Image (cartoon, grey):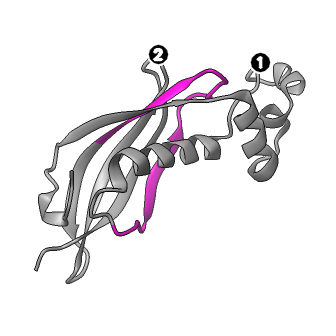
């Protein structure tokens, strides 16, 4: 577990999580945050380019974040994030998909006297091992003085 900036090893990888996506959750999230009909109405979604109900990309990002916090960040020395780069939704997430996350530390540099920023490549995959989301996250960690 990463407890500080200094404990981050570039190239280290991890895989975790198991999050089953439901129709009810897709619709509920979309009704509140992304009310496009292919996210909220299964009948309309069948006539869309997706051919069925699909999760909002923002919902996929939120599910990814949940798995990151539960399995990676909550017990670490993470102190927040200045943002993400290259967020991509690689393919639609559908009801019944089971998602998991892979991480790889790819870079780190001092941020200020008390913190360092770690660049992490994140891939969320479905049960078929297909990537559904990729992003490059910047995470701040406490520096040992």
For the C terminus, the quadrant is: bottom left
Q: Nearer the viewer, residue 138 or 8?
A: 8
User: Residue 65's spot in the image, x, y percent?
Assistant: 49, 49
Residue at 45% in and 43% down:
67
* Lateral position of residue 44 relative to residue 118, left or right: right
Q: Which residues are magenta?
A: 79-103
User: Residue 141's spot in the image, x, y percent?
Assistant: 26, 67
The answer to which of marks 2 and 1 sits earlier in the sequence is 1
Residue at 42% in and 47% down:
70
Numbered label attached to residue 73? none
Based on the picture, tell me whether residue 37 belongs to the magenta stretch: no
Q: Tell me the element at label 1.
A: loop
Q: According to the image, label 1 marks what residue? A: 51
* Lateral position of residue 71 relative to residue 6, left or right: right
Marks 2 and 1 sit apart, C-alpha to C-alpha, by: 19 Å
User: Residue 90's spot in the image, x, y percent?
Assistant: 53, 32
Q: According to the image, label 2 marks what residue? A: 128
Tag in front: 2 or 1? 2
* Lateral position of residue 99 relative to residue 102, left or right: right
* Lateral position of residue 140 relative to residue 106, left or right: right
| Crowd tier of the residue under label 2, counting other residues whose Cα lies within 10 Å: few below 14, some 14–19, many 20 or above | few
């Amino acid at each position: 577990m990463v407890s500080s900036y200094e404990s981050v090893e570039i190239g280290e990888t991890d895989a975790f999580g198991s999050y089953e996506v439901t129709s009810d959750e897709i619709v509920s999230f979309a009704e509140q945050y992304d009310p496009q009909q292919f996210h909220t109405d299964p009948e309309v979604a069948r006539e869309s380019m997706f051919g069925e109900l699909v999760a909002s990309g923002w919902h996929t990002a939120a599910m990814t974040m949940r798995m990151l916090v539960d399995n990676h960040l909550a017990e670490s020395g993470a102190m927040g994030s200045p943002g993400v780069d290259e967020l991509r939704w690689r393919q639609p997430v559908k009801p019944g998909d089971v998602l998991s996350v892979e991480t790889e530390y790819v870079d780190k540099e001092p941020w200020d006297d008390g913190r360092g920023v770690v660049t992490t490549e994140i891939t969320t995959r479905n049960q078929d091992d297909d990537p559904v989301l990729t992003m490059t996250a910047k995470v701040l960690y406490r520096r040992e003085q």
